[in-house]
Image (tube, rainbow, N blue to C red):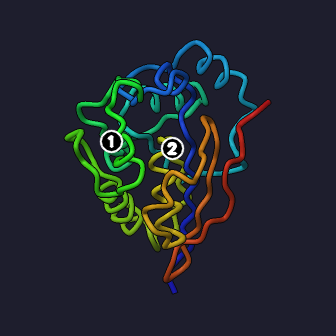
Amino acid sequence: MSAVTRLTLITHAITDAVQAARFPADEPLNPLGERSVAAAGGLPALDPTLILCAPELRTSQTAKALGLSATPEPALRDLNCGTWSGKSMDDITPDHLMSWLTDPTHNSHNGESLTALLTRVRTWLDTLAGSGDRILAITHPAVVRAAILTTLTAPPESFWRIDIPPLTATTLHHRAPTWTLRTTAHALTP
């Protein structure tokens, strides 16, 4: 029997893109995000053997503000929004936006489709399975949604039905042969 792997995914603090409903670019935390992470009451009771973060600035800033020294992990990067990065949803033609929201294979933005994101996250989870590590990872809501869908073997069309706010923790456990959703959306609050 393989060892139990524990994975806690924490979403980064708020940015201007999150606050303005824009497609993300590699941007820093905004003042509200900085204040909210500084006021966070702390992390879930963990004793991680491995601390990771997505390679974007907002995740490394969140990790640092939480007092964590995290190793960048490319598999945790945000959904690549391609030519839509930095744009408001109002800047996207309604037919392209609707297709993106309803078709998980949509890629008119020359970025990453939801199905590609799901494959990336599934592959990464497979590399962790059975390691016995207690992993803490600072990442993005899209990556957390993908991890939940993978864990529940839910259809990709369910992606947008999961609300993952900034500074929340979602915990998964792997006991051979599958991942299990342990808890989700616990806000890091004072």
Judged from this view, the residue extending furthest toward the left is 110
In the displayed structure, 7 sits above or below 20; it is: below
Q: Which quadrant of the figure has residue 188?
A: top right
Q: Residue at x 41, y 54 (%)?
A: 102
In this view, the residue in front, 158 or 165, is 158
Q: Is residue 41 above or below residue 31?
A: below
Is 124 situated left or right of 49 in this image? left
The residue most toward the top is 31
Q: Which residue is mark 2?
A: 141
Alpha carbon separation for disc pair 2 and 1: 24 Å
The amino acid pointed to by label 2 is Pro
Q: Residues within 10 Å of mark 2 (few under 14, many from 20)?
A: many
Question: Which of these two is toward me, 108 or 61?
Answer: 108
Kindly indicate whether the residue at mark 1 contacts the one at mark 2 (C-beta within 8 angstroms). Answer: no
Indicate the secondary structure of the residue bearing disc 2.
helix
Task: Identify the residue at horizontal 41%, vertical 25% (top origin).
Answer: 90
Q: Residue at x 53, y 29 (%)?
A: 62
Q: Position of residue 130 (x, y in %)?
A: 47, 74
Q: Position of residue 64 (x, y in %)?
A: 53, 27
Closest to the observer, 53 or 121: 121
Q: Quadrant of the C terminus?
A: top right
Question: Is 60 positioned to the left or the right of 173 in the image?
Answer: left
Q: Is residue 28 left or right of residue 165?
A: left
- How far from the left and from the top, in percent, is residue 149? 50, 64
Name the residue tied to disc 1: 95
**x, y percentage for residue 28?**
44, 19
Q: Is residue 67 left or right of residue 122?
A: right
Secondary element at tag 1: helix
Query: The disc labelled 1 sits on which kind of residue?
Result: Asp
Count of numbered circles in the view: 2
Outermost right residue: 190
Q: Nearer the viewer, mark 2 or mark 1?
A: 1
